[in-house]
Amino acid sequence: MKIALGCDEAGLPMMDMIRDYLKQKQIEVQDFGVHSVDPVDYPDIALVASEAVASGECERGILVCGTGIGMSITANKVPGVRAALCHDTYSAERARKSNDAQVLCMGARVIGPELAKSILDHWLDSEFAGGRSAPKVAKMNAVDEKYRGQHEDVSSKAC
């Protein structure tokens, strides 16, 4: 499994821990940054990491910012990506089993490192269960398809 990693400066310490934790588990990572405490716009990081997941370059992704909210919102704008903001193990497990979420978002200012590891373990160990959830995920995918290509490129525009 290859996992795309991305964070802003607020998420850097947690992402450093996550990167090391994944490497201990012999999971390949593709690191999209950041690597310093200099301020960065989290949508820029979430976009490139999520695009790696949507394209199939990476099987899953993990995004961390202060709350995880901004990363989650941005990741979910990328067609083909289902990102879940999880601050507990049950949500992480259900994100995979019920929603087939390929991107996990967490808030470094919301949870501590040990809980983050536990959330990560539940998310990694869970697979999409299909069943009654399959038609719902298919409907989410249909929403993606409906709006795919209708967005102009905003990556280089200023607010």
Image (tube, grey):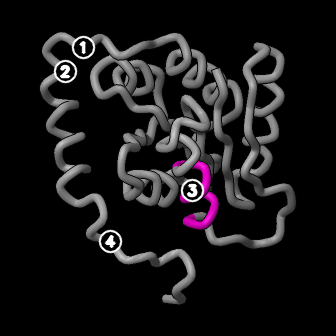
Q: Quadrant of residue 124?
A: top right
Distance, label 2 to label 1, CA atoms, is 5 Å
Lower position in the chain sequence, tag 3 or tag 4 = 3
Where does the magenta region start and end?
Answer: 43-50
Residue type, mark 4 in image:
His
Residue type, mark 2 in image:
Ala
- At numbered mark 2, what does the secondary structure look like: helix, strand or loop? helix
- Queried whether the magenta region covers residue 55, the answer comes back as no
Query: Mark 4 — residue?
Result: 151
Query: Mark 1 — residue?
Result: 130
Residue 156: image location, x then y, percent: 57, 81
Query: Mark 2 — residue?
Result: 134
Residue type, mark 1 in image:
Gly
Query: Mark 3 — residue?
Result: 46
Distance, label 3 to label 4, CA atoms, is 17 Å
* Residue at point 13%, 25% (across, down): 135
Residue 146 higher or lower than 112, as above or below: below
Distance, label 1 to label 4, CA atoms, is 30 Å
User: Could you say which is closer to the camera, residue 125 or residue 67?
Assistant: 125
Do the residues under discs 2 and 1 have CB atoms within 8 angstroms?
A: yes
Distance, label 3 to label 1, CA atoms, is 27 Å
Residue 120: image location, x then y, percent: 59, 24
Lower position in the chain sequence, tag 3 or tag 1 = 3
Overall secondary structure of the magenta section: helix
* Residue at point 71%, 32% (across, down): 113
User: Could you say which is closer to the camera, residue 143 or residue 119?
Assistant: 143
Residue 100: image location, x then y, percent: 35, 26
Q: Is residue 108 left or right of residue 13?
A: left
Neighbour class for label 3 at 10 Å: few (<14), some, many (≥20)? many
